[in-house]
Amino acid sequence: MNSSITRFVRTFDRFARILSVVGAVAAGIILLAMTFHILAEIVLRTLFLRSTFVLEEMIGYGVAAMSFLGLGYALNSGALIRMNLVLEKLGNGQIRRIAEVICIIAAAAFTGTAAWYFYINAVRDFVRGHVSETLSETPLWLPPSIMLLGMLVFIVQLLAYLLRVLAGDVSFSAGLRGRE
């Protein structure tokens, strides 16, 4: 294969991996923040008979944000649940590559469509100034925006995987990150 194409595929893959790691680190930071919020809530309720009154809401936002921000990293590391029953029967040949390409395109199309609707929702909530009906009055454009970022990282990671598959730089017998 052309060395400039190979160099582009590897550079794009490196970029996608960096984005995925950033998303995973952000998810980890959110997990830590949620843990500290839960601990603070326990201390407040137990010792002071008080509450932040927003624990459930913030934990819900945090779980959603972590789930989406971690998608790219999960795909890259092979931790994402995939339906491999049929794909494994196809072996490591051209038919398997075609099936992988179809799956990647379908996943990117589905994620891209969802991302578009999340974008529309976030913009609408931002323009209208919608906030949650809780004590925190969280701007409602914020949670879908974070989830949108996670979906965009996932799409970039899907594109990197697609490029690697098309370039023949994936060994399916070695798993998702396997190199030939």
Image (tube, rainbow, N blue to C red):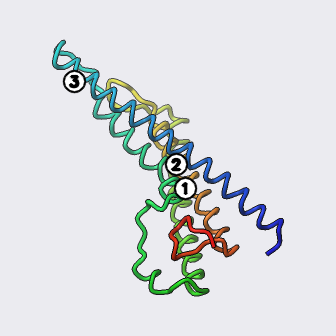
- The residue under label 1 is which amino acid type? Phe
Under circle 2, the secondary element is helix
Residue 42's disc is 3
Q: Which residue is mark 1?
A: 154
Q: Which residue is mark 2?
A: 150
The alpha-carbon separation of the residues under discs 1 and 3 comes to: 35 Å
Whether the residues at callouts 1 and 2 have beta carbons within 8 Å, the answer is: yes
Residue in the picture at 50% in, 45% down? 24
* Left-right relation of 47 to 121: left
Q: Nearer the viewer, residue 77 or 59?
A: 77
Crowding at mark 1 (Cα within 10 Å: few <14, some 14-19, many 20+): many
- The residue under label 3 is which amino acid type? Ile
Residue in the picture at 83% in, 65% down? 4
178 is higher (above) or lower (below) than 43:
below
Under circle 1, the secondary element is helix
Residue 93 spot, x, y in % from top left:
59, 86
Under circle 3, the secondary element is helix
104 is higher (above) or lower (below) than 128:
below
